Image (cartoon, rainbow, N blue to C red):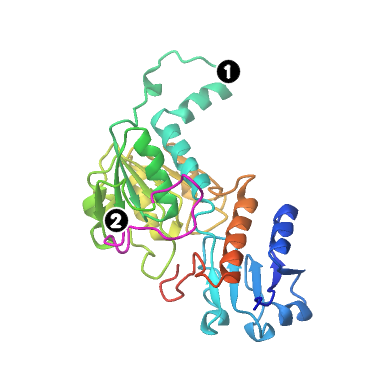
Amino acid sequence: MKRPSLTLLVNAPLEEDQRKRIRDLGVHLVDGLSEENLRAADVIYTTRIPFEPRRAPRLRWIQLNTVAVDHILTGDVTTTGVRIANVRGAYSVAVAELVVGAMVALTRRFQSAYSLQLRNRWPDDFTPLRGENCYGKTLSIVGYGSIGRQLARIVTGMGMRVLACKRCPERRKDEGFSLPNTGDPEGHFPEEWYGLNNIGEMVSVSDVLVICLPLTSETRGVIEQSDLAKLPRDAYLINVGRGEVVAKEALLEVLRTRRIAGAALDVFPEEPLSGGSPFWGLPNTIILPHIGSFTREQGHLAGEVLIENLTRDLSASPLLNLIDPQRGY
């Protein structure tokens, strides 16, 4: 017996060729959050959930086009039994590449070189531009999800040693969405694994500390002043997770006093970053306006997760990337 067609309500950007592929699956597409569309929707593709669940009586699951889910976990939808999936794995390549770019910019003194470029000057003294090799250094990843796994894949090829920290370090496999030939689905790259309760031990042997954690009640402020104090003086910190997972004042202090060599920050406790924020004045810090996943390919890759999950639904297979509202990711 042929499975009844799904009705997909589209409330996020979706490319025309992907729409065609979805129609070819036998799925009916409607656009916009009208009352009629909400009543008909079996699945909704959206960035946020700006509607009451009771307005969508047929709704079975929601596909977000974001990785972060903290922005939708305060509404009624989490108590209705409607499943919610994110696009974890779709943006891991983009964010991991940004981390590598930031790491190289820090270790090879790109900021100092650029300041000379702005003044049309060749250096009289090359000493401030003397960089460091990444090869042979230890890169520690706090939050070994899809981004961390792709980052580990890249930097292992650069000759770096990888350490990993995650909520359940004994669970080393990743069963979420991933692009072909990316990531570390079996958890082979890290030489050592740590839990959130022993971050400080990992931090103390890190040359580069990369934070990829989502924001949950468990991760808020999890990297404390005592952890930052254990970083070696020549270490770098890169945060592409959430600003709130790091103690703000402690981070500012280690950067102001040059207790560590420098940082690259793509996320902050308050965004947008205000003009008066003390982060702006830190010469050893690269400030990025939360652009880790912001590439030309972003929308297309999110759509690929949607198509994969629609295909799975139609074949009665388990959906990928379902979130646990209790855990917050």
Q: Reading the chain from its start, which is encountered first: label 1 or label 2?
A: 1
Q: Main secondary structure of the magenta part?
A: loop
Q: CA distance from mark 1 to mark 2?
A: 40 Å
| Residue 61 image offset from top left, x and y in percent | 58, 75
Disc assigned to residue 120: 1
Residue type at the position of mark 2: Gln
Disc assigned to residue 293: none
Residue type at the position of mark 1: Asn
> Residue 327 sits in which quadrant?
bottom left
SS category of the residue bearing label 2: helix
> Residue 226 sits in which quadrant?
bottom left
Provide the residue designation for mark 2.
225
Check if residue 43 falls in the magenta segment. Answer: no
**Position of 178 compared to 198: left or right?**
right
| Residue 139 image offset from top left, x and y in percent | 32, 42
Q: Is residue 122 among what the camera can see?
A: yes
**Position of 12 compared to 278: left or right?**
right
Q: Quadrant of the N terminus?
A: bottom right
